[in-house]
Image (cartoon, coloured by chain):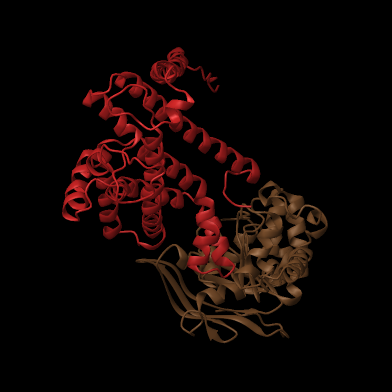
Chain colours: A brown, B red
Amino acid sequence: MLTPTLPETKPIKLSVRNMAFSYGTKKVLDGLSMDIHAERVTAIIGPSGCGKSTFLKCFNRIHEVSSTVNVSGDMLIDGVDIYRGGIDEVDLRRRVGMVFQKPNPFPKSIYENVAFGPRLFGVTDRSSLDGIVEDALRKAALWDEVKDRLKESATGMSGGQQQRLCIARALAVNPEVLLMDEPCSALDPIATAKIEDLITDLKENLTIVIVTHNMQQAARVSDYTAFFWLGRLVEMDLTERIFTTPRVQMTEDYITGRFG
Amino acid sequence: MTPVLTFRRSRTSKFVDRLMRGVLWGLAILFVLVLVVFVGAILKQGWPVLNLGFLTKMPETLDAGGGIKPQIFNSLYLVVLSLGLSLPVGLGAGVYMAEYAGKGRMLNFLRLCIETLAATPSIVLALFGMIVFVQAMGWSFSIRSGALTLALLNIPVITRVTEVSLLAVPRELKEASYGLGATKLQTILKVTLPYAATGILTGLVLTAGRAFGESAILVFTAGTNASAHFPDFRLTVPGETLSVHLWYVTSDGTLPDAREIAAGTAAVVILVLLTLNLLVRLVDRAIRRRTRSGLFST
């Protein structure tokens, strides 16, 4: 296991030790260890099928919704085990938000999409909700575009706007960590640029982990980059170093496009 | 030199394509024609009988000129009662099957039971209802015997429609809800059920239509007599419905105008069913327009 060596001032938010993941008898991830720092953006790259999305989903246990899975080893958030530390998965998902590959707004109004999360936790008072909705939409750089049509259906927005709405929706429950699973793969370059700017703004008080197929994107937005191959972590380092002087030949081959 | 490949479509594939289009069109038109002729014949015979008096008078037993007021009431009353009984059960069972029962033998067994129940001929349910409710429970021919037996007819359909509608909800939407920290129940109540509501509603109206037109079950459980009071909400009195009346007057033969009464009754049944189906279309379209995606939520 290779860990970053620069002095890091931010505390460790998520910590993974010798983690393995399997569906039934099929092992998808094995022997993973890494530390993810608060207020940093950590990118996970690797060829399709290397398990990077699966790994991301382990942080908020969202895969448990649709299938029975088996996670071994340790995955800690603020030093407490996500799977065995007595954390309720519903509470965990409030703390560890997620933005999915395909924008998935609810077929409700823009306002109701953002208010959905707070309502789950009992916020019913109109002025509090208004405040939360505006704040979340501002943080997602969407407020100016939608403030006059909050009552309109979210499914009528452009793909990029929908994805920023999904980010606003996730931010509205005040998460500590934001997981992003290829958030720009369905978007055009302009919408992608907006999301990337947003990621840089958001990391000021969030821990962000982003899975991406786009090497330039990883280089642009992330502080750390982890390279996955066949369910294992090949190398993790400061993004700058991964893209200039990787220590493992395979990493260099991948980022220069020789395979994958 | 590389050979020049020309991709020429064979004549037959184009011909078969056009032929199939024609055949399918023809079938569709044939089907519509059958429906038009059928409905047309019923309405043509029933139309002269249909007037306010026919709809608002009590029936006669021996003389001509009777109405069908209590039968209209009984039909609607039984539909409402049976749906009221079967909706909670069917909805609950459907939600259980789609969301709670894990995949596997248990679910397959449940599904088999539901489908068997759905495929049971209504005359079998009718005799079951007569033995259990009319005789064993001692409720005789009554609204309550009819409503409970009719509910047995509705439950499997509502269950299946609910399950299918829920399974059609995109996984992404459920994930979005869980991802925000929603519990399973919150997700079902706030995302899954509202999304599936159009489908469930459509199924519900179709079920209502089937219950409205049902005759076999009600002949054996609700009886062939209508209360002399109107409106009679008692559950213990017999409740002859329109479909039963239609069958009874023509087979009993004591009414001089049995043919006319039957034709008028049939026309009323058909008109109500058409209205119900039209209503579903309108509701569905309104919902689609409002949310751009045919969903039941704002």
Of all residues, the one furthest to the front in this rendering is B63
Q: Quadrant of the C terminus of chain A?
A: bottom right
Determine the residue positioned at 42% across, 15% down: B44
Q: Nearer the viewer, residue B139 or A222?
A: B139
Q: Is residue A240 left or right of residue A106?
A: right
Determine the residue positioned at 34% across, 66% down: A25
The answer to whether one can see residue A215 in this image is: no
Q: Quadrant of residue B22?
A: top left
Please provide percent x and percent y for residue A150: 75, 55
Report the label total: 0
Q: Is residue B24 left or right of residue A220?
A: left
Q: Nearer the viewer, residue B227 or B155?
A: B227
Of all residues, the one furthest to the right in this rendering is A144
Determine the residue positioned at 83% across, 57% down: A144
The answer to whether one can see residue B98 in this image is: yes
Please provide percent x and percent y for residue B57: 41, 31
Q: Quadrant of the N terminus of chain A?
A: bottom right
Determine the residue positioned at 34% across, 40% down: B228
